[in-house]
Image: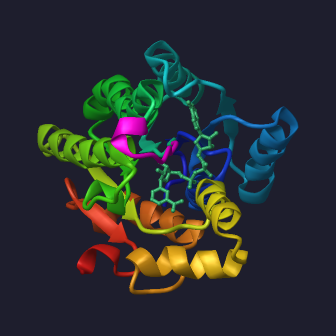
């Protein structure tokens, strides 16, 4: 379905981004991967995408907290492949503390990486998408884009902002063949969440499984993690012809978290 098209997935060296890049590649898209990590592991991922799915893949080391690097990454994607058709804003970080203990530099970093990066990448990618009358923009928000939890002031603010940003972009591009949607996952077992479980285990002295169940049942009626591949499958659907009129939506994939 996406054969001949190009997809850029930010923060795709790990977790949800990696699974989404692989799902889009499986559907035929050429891929730009991005994110931090071990050089050899990133090269293995890039080469694996090409080998497993018969597409072309390049890597951009752009730092999503740096607007100039984001613009350059989008320009490189367009130059290398002739166009950027699918943009998935996924890079994200987390920090947990009460607001009075929340370091201002952590607030700035979370707002920059989890929210402002999407503004900068969409701003750079939109002119060409509008010109070609086709584009799919998917912002990986969170259940925390729709509801709040304590100690996550920057993350919740950034993810609510990302849902709002997605709606504005959807309105502005509604008749240009471009759709923009947010995906709002609940708990997905990735390194970002594993770290939270490890921190809880250290603090409580309980087993990892006990803390996993405790973490899930605080929020989700369904006591199972969403798989990163499930997010990838939803992203592929949002790129399909069947989803051509879905725009400005916030798609929950969260085991019933926000249904309560
Ligand atoms: P992860 O930690 O496994 O991956 C994060 C990715 O972002 C990595 O590739 C990392 O290198 C990259 N990244 C971080 N800072 C960056 C920067 N400055 N520039 C470029 N890349 C950077 O996390 P994940 O769990 O896969 O999360 C991916 C997205 O999904 C995040 O936006 C997160 O908020 C969101 N999300 C995750 C969950 C969950 O339960 N895991 C739930 C809801 C939403």
Q: How is the image coloured?
A: rainbow
48 and 104: which is toward the camera: 104
Residue at 32%, 30% (x, y): give it. Answer: 119
183 and 194: which is toward the camera: 194
Look at the image and give the residue range highlighted in magenta.
93-101
In percent of width and height, residue 209 lies at 68, 80
- Magenta span includes 46: no
Q: In the visual, does 228 lie left or right of 243?
A: right
In percent of width and height, residue 124 lies at 36, 23
Q: Is residue 216 above or below residue 195?
A: below
Residue at 63%, 53% (x, y): give it. Answer: 18
Residue at 50%, 86% (x, y): give it. Answer: 223
Quarter containing the C terminus: bottom left
Q: Is residue 147 above or below residue 69?
A: below
Q: In the visual, does 2 lie left or right of 121?
A: right
Residue at 69%, 76% (x, y): give it. Answer: 206
In percent of width and height, residue 22 lies at 64, 57
């Amino acid at each position: 379905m996406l054969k001949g098209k190009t997809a850029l997935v930010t923060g795709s060296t790990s977790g949800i981004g990696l699974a989404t890049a692989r799902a889009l590649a499986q559907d035929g898209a050429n891929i730009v991967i991005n994110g931090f990590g071990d050089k050899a592991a990133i090269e293995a991922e890039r080469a694996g995408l090409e080998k497993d799915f018969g597409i072309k893949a390049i890597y951009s080391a752009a730092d999503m907290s740096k607007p100039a690097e984001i613009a350059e990454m989008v320009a490189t994607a367009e130059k290398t492949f002739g166009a950027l058709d699918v943009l998935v804003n996924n890079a994200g970080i987390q920090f947990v503390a009460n607001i009075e203990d929340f370091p201002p530099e952590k607030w700035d970093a979370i707002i920059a990486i989890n929210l402002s990066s999407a503004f900068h990448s969409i701003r750079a990618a939109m002119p060409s998408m509008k010109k070609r009358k086709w584009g799919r923009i998917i912002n990986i928000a969170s259940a925390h884009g729709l509801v709040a939890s304590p100690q996550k002031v920057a993350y919740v603010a950034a993810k609510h902002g990302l849902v709002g940003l997605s709606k504005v972009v959807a309105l502005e591009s509604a008749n240009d063949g471009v759709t923009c949607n947010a995906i709002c996952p609940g708990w997905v077992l990735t390194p970002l969440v594993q770290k939270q479980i490890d921190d809880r285990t250290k603090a409580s002295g309980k087993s990892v499984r006990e803390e996993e169940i405790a973490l899930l049942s605080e929020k989700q009626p369904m006591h199972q993690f969403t798989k990163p591949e499930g997010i990838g499958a939803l992203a592929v659907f949002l790129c399909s012809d069947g989803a051509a009129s879905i725009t400005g939506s916030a798609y929950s994939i969260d085991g019933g978290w926000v249904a309560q």
